[in-house]
Image (cartoon, rainbow, N blue to C red):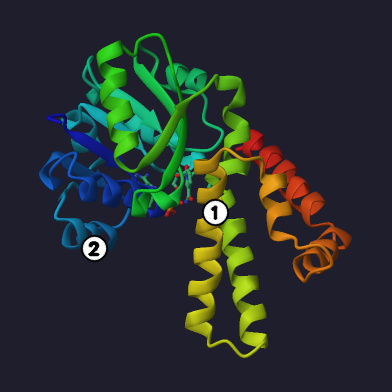
Amino acid sequence: MKKKIGFIGCGKMAQAMIKGLISSGTISPKQIMVSAKTHTTLELVKEKYSIQTANDNRVVAGWSDILFLAVKPEIHKEVIQEIKQEIAEHTVIITVAAGITIGFLEKEFDKQIKAVRSMPNTPSFVGEGMSALCINEEVSKEDMDDVLKIFRSFGQVEVIKEQLMDSIPAISGSSPAYVYLFIEALADGGVRNGIPREQAYRFASQAVLGAAKMVLETGIHPGELKDQVCTPGGATIEAVAALEENGFRAAVLQAMDKCTEKTKKL
Ligand SMILES: NC(=O)C1=CN([C@@H]2O[C@H](COP(=O)(O)OP(=O)(O)OC[C@H]3O[C@@H](n4cnc5c(N)ncnc54)[C@H](O)[C@@H]3O)[C@@H](O)[C@H]2O)C=CC1
Ligand SMILES: O=C(O)[C@@H]1CCC=N1
């Protein structure tokens, strides 16, 4: 891919995408330029990924064919005011922020722009991201091919209707956080039973990875896969019963409602 890709904001999410992009070999590090708030961050990412950096958001905005806005939702307005004059006609602008709509981008840039609203997640760092995106009418078929190539370089991507975008943080943008809680809890349980801590993380994580792969690759309903593990009168059904008694599923659903509620306010 020949395009120049810029990132305004270079925190956890931007770095996960940059690492995934570079590791996949889709583009060379020299085709990436980032700006961030602090000089320390820029020095650090330059050293880590051998990418280009700029102290001025406007430099990145003017240089990029594809520009990621990877700052927090509440910073979008001020960043857009700062860079809007620098954007070339052909530049595709991609926000990764929760709650930032296409309409907001169009209004704040106040001119015809090629806009993409996306919701990636941090497992992009290891090439196993899950992203959702939607676009406005200015994004051409050729632009879209490039955008999809970028997102596919660090995981899976699906194009969805914008009405569903506020529901994506709860299911894939934020959900790695709850999965890490689950893995940590599994490991704690292992440690409690005498398994060394590092080994407990390996057992717990590989079990989660394997279970996810079973759902994705066999196409078997998760309930049936659960049943396959529950030997009649066995140990697993005791664990499942205890989880149900403690409202495991209800807790997940409630957590997701909270996440979506907050996303809509961002
Ligand atoms: N962390 C995650 O798992 C995910 C985050 N996101 C979205 O990504 C965006 C960034 O989140 P994180 O990377 O987690 O935050 P972060 O706090 O790690 O990174 C924010 C970055 O923005 C920079 N920044 C702040 N003010 C700036 C300014 N005026 N100009 C240029 N850069 C500026 C900071 O220096 C920092 O590099 C948010 O909008 C969030 O909704 C989306 C999906 C997942
Ligand atoms: O916590 C947040 O607001 C962001 C959005 C998805 C994951 N992190």
Horizontal side of 107 relative to 142 (left or right) equals right
Q: From what the image shows, is residue 61 above or below residue 227?
A: above
- List x then y, in percent, for residue 73: 50, 39
In the picture, the disc for residue 176 is 1
Q: Is residue 208 visible?
A: yes
Q: Amino acid at mark 2?
A: Leu
Quadrant of the rendered structure where residue 88 is? top left
Q: Which residue is mark 2?
A: 44
Q: Amino acid at mark 1?
A: Pro
Q: Which residue: 69% across, 54% down? A: 228
In the picture, the disc for residue 76 is none
Q: Which residue: 46% across, 46% down? A: 121
- List x then y, in percent, for residue 213: 50, 49
Pick the quarter of the image with the C terminus: top right
Toward the viewer: 238 or 86? 238
Q: Secondary structure at mark 1?
A: helix
Toward the viewer: 182 or 85? 182
